[in-house]
Image: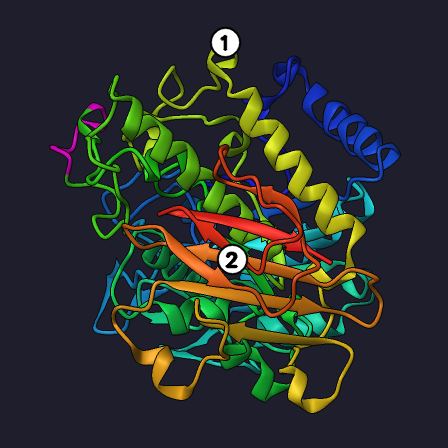
């Protein structure tokens, strides 16, 4: 919850009580840039920490409440809230817009960040109560020369609307459909295959008709809100009792699966399945078209012990436990990142179509029997396995990505016999390149190349 839009949070700094947080932030950005890492700042302009009419007066409420906040027309003492926090910034007012634009320019010119992720960005595009692609906020951002080259990423929803696919061409978006559909597929949800195929190919059903590329989709399975990846595959339900709200806070529709146990267990079979599931999700994220976003700590198996709303837990619940870090998972993630970096076939710039188009860059989908999927196959509730063949004119390698989210092993007939195994979530998988078929274990994937 922001109070000042032009100041880094002092508790993140070792010298935050003397203004040293500004110098430390600049030093951090400089060091990251030296390592060829861009800095994207998560900004919350949609609300402040002042809450509703019962909340404290900390900043804008005391300066000019009616200008800076959206109020209910019929009751100017009440706040019109589209953020779930008690208040919403009145972005249509010149004073509020000027504050936001001054803040954005400050972080670019003084702090040298490379882009912004806008929390609940849909709220910022509202004119009156409706979403508007030509809102004053969007117009000013697009026209500002200081912001002309920075990256813009929207969280395209708020409590009053879901706008995935609705932002202008220059923007990328957190793709909530990717999160939901990938989670559904890997927990074996009936009828999830078609949506899964859309997500791993960059969500053409969302972006292609408006001529936006796969890079418009910021793909994620987990984020700071909700379960960590380890908890997503270890709990069926949230466990937020420590938050003091009788476990009523946080998302209840998590599409999670504890793999046969709720929370900690010593069952070797459950632990092995959870390890595969974490790798299945990470691989889906890093082998899909679009921009992958990994929640910090997922690469080492960080757990919040079932708490999916740990914003209020600055303690062992949310801290990294380095002693418990899963280094094998970390290496697996690094291997996937290296693969994606090396091979253009795994990070296409534009949407691909099947090989029947005679293009060198294509994606084909095969059933386990080696036949290409027909229209009816996509809506088959029992279909939970797939072979995805990925090729690019810019890549010497063609990839065969085999996924099986069903509860039983599936034998795939391969479209050719000159494949080699690259990586798998199944530690026992060892494909011999001379074989015409391959057996894929339940709840696992294997990536082949030729």
The residue carrying mark 1 is: 323
Give me the C-alpha separation between circle 1 and circle 2.
Answer: 34 Å
> In the picture shown, does residue 378 fall above or below 247?
below
Colour basis: rainbow
**Can you see residue 121?**
no
Q: Which residues are magenta?
A: 242-247
Residue at position x 29%, y 33% in the image: 234
In the foreground, 12 or 351: 351
Judged by depth in the image, the label closer to the viewer, 1 or 2, is 2
Q: Which mark is residue 402?
A: 2
Residue 204: quadrant of the picture: bottom right
Nearer-N-terminus badge (1/2): 1
> In the picture shown, does residue 117 fall above or below 350?
above
Identify the element where label 2 is drawn: strand
Q: Which mark is residue 382?
A: none
**Image coords of residue 171 (percent x, y):** 64, 69
Magenta span dominant secondary structure: loop
Residue 364 located within the stretch drawn in magenta: no
Residue 386: quadrant of the picture: bottom left
Residue 228: quadrant of the picture: top left
């Amino acid at each position: 919850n922001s109070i000042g839009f032009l100041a880094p949070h002092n508790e993140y700094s070792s010298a935050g009580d003397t203004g040293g947080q500004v110098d430390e932030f600049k030093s951090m950005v400089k060091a990251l840039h030296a390592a060829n890492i861009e800095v994207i700042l998560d900004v919350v302009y949609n609300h402040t920490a002042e809450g509703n009419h019962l909340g404290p007066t900390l900043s804008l409420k005391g300066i000019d409440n009616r200008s800076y906040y959206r109020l209910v027309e019929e009751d100017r003492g009440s706040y019109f809230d589209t953020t779930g926090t008690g208040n919403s910034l009145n972005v249509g007012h010149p004073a509020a817009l000027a504050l936001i634009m001054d803040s954005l320019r400050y972080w670019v010119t003084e702090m040298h960040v490379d882009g912004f992720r806008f929390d609940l960005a849909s709220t910022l595009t509202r004119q009156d109560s409706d979403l508007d692609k030509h809102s004053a906020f969007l117009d000013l951002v697009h026209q500002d020369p200081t912001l002309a080259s920075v990256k813009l990423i929207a969280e395209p929803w708020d409590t009053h609307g879901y706008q995935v696919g609705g932002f202008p061409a220059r923007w990328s978006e957190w793709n909530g459909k990717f999160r939901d559909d990938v989670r559904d597929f890997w927990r074996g949800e009936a009828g999830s295959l078609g949506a899964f195929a859309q997500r791993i190919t960059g969500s053409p059903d969302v972006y292609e008709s408006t001529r936006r590329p796969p890079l418009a989709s910021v793909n994620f399975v987990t984020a700071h809100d909700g379960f960590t990846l380890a908890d997503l595959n270890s709990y069926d339900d949230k466990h937020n009792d420590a938050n003091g709200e009788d476990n009523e806070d946080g998302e209840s529709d998590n599409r999670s699966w504890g793999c046969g146990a709720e929370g900690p267990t010593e069952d070797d079979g459950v632990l092995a399945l959870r390890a595969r599931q974490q790798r299945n999700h990470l691989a889906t994220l890093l082998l899909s078209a679009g921009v992958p976003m990994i929640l910090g700590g997922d690469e080492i198996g960080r757990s919040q012990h079932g708490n999916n709303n740990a914003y209020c837990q600055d303690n062992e619940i949310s801290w990294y436990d380095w002693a418990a870090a899963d280094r094998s998972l970390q290496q697996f993630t690094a291997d996937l990142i290296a693969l994606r970096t090396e091979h253009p076939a795994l990070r296409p710039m534009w949407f691909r179509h099947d090989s029947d188009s005679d293009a060198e860059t294509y994606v084909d989908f095969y059933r386990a029997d080696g036949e290409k999927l027909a229209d009816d196959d996509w809506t088959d509730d029992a279909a939970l396995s797939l072979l995805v063949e990925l090729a690019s004119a810019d890549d010497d390698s063609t990839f065969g990505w085999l996924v099986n989210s069903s509860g039983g092993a599936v034998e795939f007939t391969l479209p050719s016999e000159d494949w080699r195994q690259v990586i798998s979530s199944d530690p026992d998988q060892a494909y011999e390149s001379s074989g015409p078929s391959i057996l894929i274990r339940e709840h696992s994937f294997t990536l082949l190349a030729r």
